[in-house]
Image (cartoon, grey):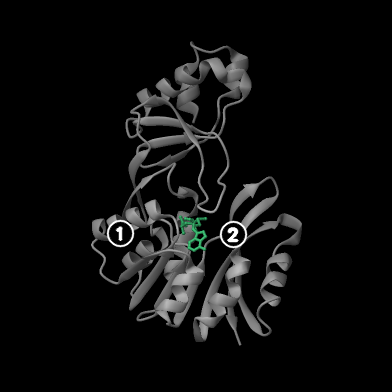
């Protein structure tokens, strides 16, 4: 972000200029920063206004107050400049997504991972996305590959509401979205799938028995987990071993950094 620093050159001291954050997430028209260093507390507004001036696609500048937490994996956001809204429409991988960045989970950082998964989906597959949020995985898959149908299950009612809106917005007819706990919904659906995606790295492990029960023969599971760098991929594979006696690992992928030396990872595996 050299141009932001350039723009701020006459407004901040050399020391403070060096502390200006180098990166942020852009979700639709919202720029989302991690908490600024405390030395920049008084300059927050100057920096945010500068960003609004130099990047016309940004209409709101906000700061994350906490990491994602709780059952719905939400984060607290504080707006520091621009339009006072937390709702926006984000574009990635040929799709559009409407969402409120505080009321639902969403990260733009997994867009490459979502495209990787969609590239693996074969024509006519039946796919289940557990923990589907605003339906970003289901919609990316529906738009970029040719599955027969996709089931999506999400417990956060607001995320589910956006999910229905996003399915319409992207004119998709093959996604069936369900609101509720996957442990209660799946037994009611009583169906098996060729591919199951489990994007809940915090405790996907506790849903593995359920996923295995609903997987077709030769089906594939994408199991997300957090892993320390030195334990990758062993610790995640060990979690799978506790629930599945025989399986073939198809791929192990680091798909994002969660904390220093801790990664968000995905293990693609096929029970045998
Ligand atoms: C890490 S977020 C992932 C959301 C989405 N798949 C994405 O990639 O943006 C996990 C999601 O799982 C949902 N969730 C947590 N427990 C659940 C459960 N038992 N059944 C269904 N959804 C659940 C949360 O509300 C949250 O939206």
Give residue 28's quadrant in the image.
top left
Give residue 84's quadrant in the image.
top left
At x 42%, y 43%, the residue is: 101
Relative to residue 43, is residue 237 depicted above or below? below
In the image, 195 versus 161, the foreground residue is: 161
In the displayed structure image, the side of residue 30 where residue 47 appears, left or right: right
Q: Few, some or many C-alpha atoms within 10 Å of disc 1 (few <14, some 14-19, many ≥20)? A: some
Answer yes or no: is residue 173 visible: yes
Viewport quadrant of the C terminus? bottom right
Q: Is mark 1 within 8 Å of ligand 1?
A: no
Task: Say what secondary structure mark 1 lies in.
Answer: helix
Relative to residue 139, is residue 49 depicted above or below? above
- In the rendered image, residue 178, in percent from the top left (x then y), is placed at 37, 66
- In the rendered image, residue 112, in percent from the top left (x then y), is placed at 47, 57
Q: Which residue is mark 1?
A: 164
At x 59%, y 59%, the residue is: 201
Q: Is mark 2 within 8 Å of ligand 1?
A: yes
At x 49%, y 28%, the residue is: 2
In the image, 20 versus 188, the foreground residue is: 188
Relative to residue 260, is residue 46 depicted above or below? above
Task: Say what secondary structure mark 2 lies in.
Answer: loop
Q: Few, some or many C-alpha atoms within 10 Å of disc 2 (few <14, some 14-19, many ≥20)? A: some
Please tell me whether mark 1 or mark 2 is closer to you in this view: 1
Give residue 238's quadrant in the image.
bottom right
- In the rendered image, residue 146, in percent from the top left (x then y), is placed at 33, 74
- Mark 1 and mark 2: Cα distance apart in space: 24 Å
- In the rendered image, residue 270, in percent from the top left (x then y), is placed at 58, 81
Checking the image for residue 201, the label placed there is: 2
* Sooner in the amino-acid sequence: mark 1 or mark 2: 1
């Amino acid at each position: 972000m050299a141009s932001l620093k350039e723009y701020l050159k006459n407004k901040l001291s050399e020391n403070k200029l060096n502390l200006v954050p180098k990166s942020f997430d852009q979700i639709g028209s919202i720029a989302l920063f991690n908490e600024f260093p405390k030395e920049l507390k008084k300059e927050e507004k100057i920096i945010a206004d500068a960003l609004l001036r130099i990047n016309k696609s940004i209409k709101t500048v906000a700061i994350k107050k906490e990491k994602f937490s709780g059952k719905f994996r939400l984060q607290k956001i504080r707006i520091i400049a621009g339009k006072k809204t937390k709702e926006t429409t984000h574009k990635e991988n040929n799709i559009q997504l409407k969402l409120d960045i505080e009321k639902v989970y969403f990260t733009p950082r997994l867009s490459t991972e979502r495209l990787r998964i969609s590239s693996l989906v074969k024509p006519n597959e039946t796919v289940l996305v557990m923990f589907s949020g605003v339906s970003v995985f289901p919609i990316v898959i529906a738009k970029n590959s040719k599955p027969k149908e996709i089931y999506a299950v999400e417990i956060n009612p607001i995320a589910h509401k956006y999910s229905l809106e996003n399915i319409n917005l992207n004119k998709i007819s093959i996604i069936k979205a369900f609101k509720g706990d996957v442990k209660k919904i799946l037994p009611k659906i009583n169906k098996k799938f060729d591919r199951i995606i489990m994007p809940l790295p915090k405790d996907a492990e506790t849903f593995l028995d359920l996923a295995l029960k609903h997987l077709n023969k030769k089906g594939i599971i994408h199991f997300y987990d957090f892993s320390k760098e030195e334990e990758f991929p062993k610790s995640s594979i060990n979690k799978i071993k506790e629930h599945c006696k025989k399986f073939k690992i198809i791929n192990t992928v680091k798909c994002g950094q969660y904390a220093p030396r801790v990664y968000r990872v995905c293990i693609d595996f096929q029970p045998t």
